[in-house]
Amino acid sequence: MLVTQFPLPYADKAYSATLLAYVYLSRSIEQRGIDAWDSYRSRAQLFKYNKNPNVGLTIIMNNLGMGVLIEPFIISDYYFASQALRSPHKNTLQSAKSIHQWLENISVGGKEADEYSLSEMADFGKKRHNVLFKILEEKYKKGELNMTLDDLQKT
């Protein structure tokens, strides 16, 4: 909800808020595993439905480098949001499938995206999430991702 408060003119604030949200959601996933279905879905939505559409790409580019696609991250989170036995987000599996099908003729991790099954793509995205989370977690621990109430004010 926080990241939806910053429309396009406030991309820098959206970026900072998204970084913090990503770290908190990733920590929840790390601690609760597959039972963190809502955190998986919410983390996918950070990238897919952010009011500032380039924020997710910028986060990935600034921390993992250019040429790293955002789609495996989203596929992974939607896939795992649907997998827990008690998850109310079973419909996110269809979202993961749709994005996976869209990746036809695109190279991901050195091979064609359509050569990965959906579960393989989800595992690939999960590995990338783990790397990104560890990088951002370290920045968080150093105090580089903090926001104050003053930072949240629109000017």
Image: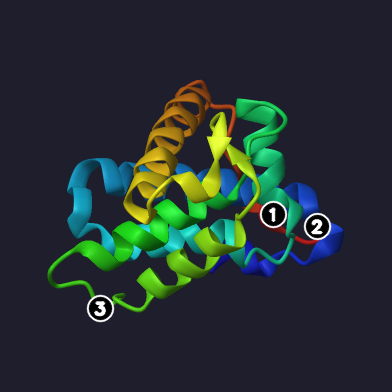
Real-space Cα separation, disc 3 to disc 1, in angstroms? 28 Å
In this figure, which residue is indicated by the disc labeled 3?
A: 88
Give the farthest residue toward the left. 85
Q: Do labels 2 and 1 touch, CB within 8 Å? A: yes
Q: Is residue 63 above or below residue 60?
A: above
Q: Amino acid at mark 2?
A: Tyr
- Mark 1: give few (<14), some (14-19) or many (20+) Cα within 10 Å: many
- What quarter of the picture does the C terminus occupy? bottom right
Q: Is residue 151 visible?
A: no
Q: Is residue 39 above or below residue 108?
A: below
Q: Amino acid at mark 3?
A: Pro
With 15 as the anchor, is 24 left or right in this view?
left
- Mark 2: give few (<14), some (14-19) or many (20+) Cα within 10 Å: some
Q: Residue at x 65, y 46 (%)?
A: 106
The image shows residue 93 at horizontal and vertical percentages of 36, 70
Residue 73 has which mark? none
Find numbered disc 2 in the image and state the secondary structure of the residue it sits on: helix
- Which numbered mark, 3 or 2, is in the foreground of this view? 3
Camera-side residue of 101 and 74 = 101
Q: Which image quarter: residue 91?
A: bottom left
With 17 as the anchor, is 52 left or right in this view?
right
Real-space Cα separation, disc 2 to disc 1, in angstroms? 6 Å
In this figure, which residue is indicated by the disc labeled 1?
A: 14
The image shows residue 104 at horizontal and vertical percentages of 61, 55
In this figure, which residue is indicated by the disc labeled 2?
A: 10
Q: Is residue 117 visible?
A: yes
Camera-side residue of 3 and 114 = 114
Q: Residue at x 69, y 54 (%)?
A: 14
Q: Is residue 15 above or below residue 92?
A: above
Q: Amino acid at mark 1?
A: Ala
Q: Residue at x 38, y 49 (%)?
A: 122
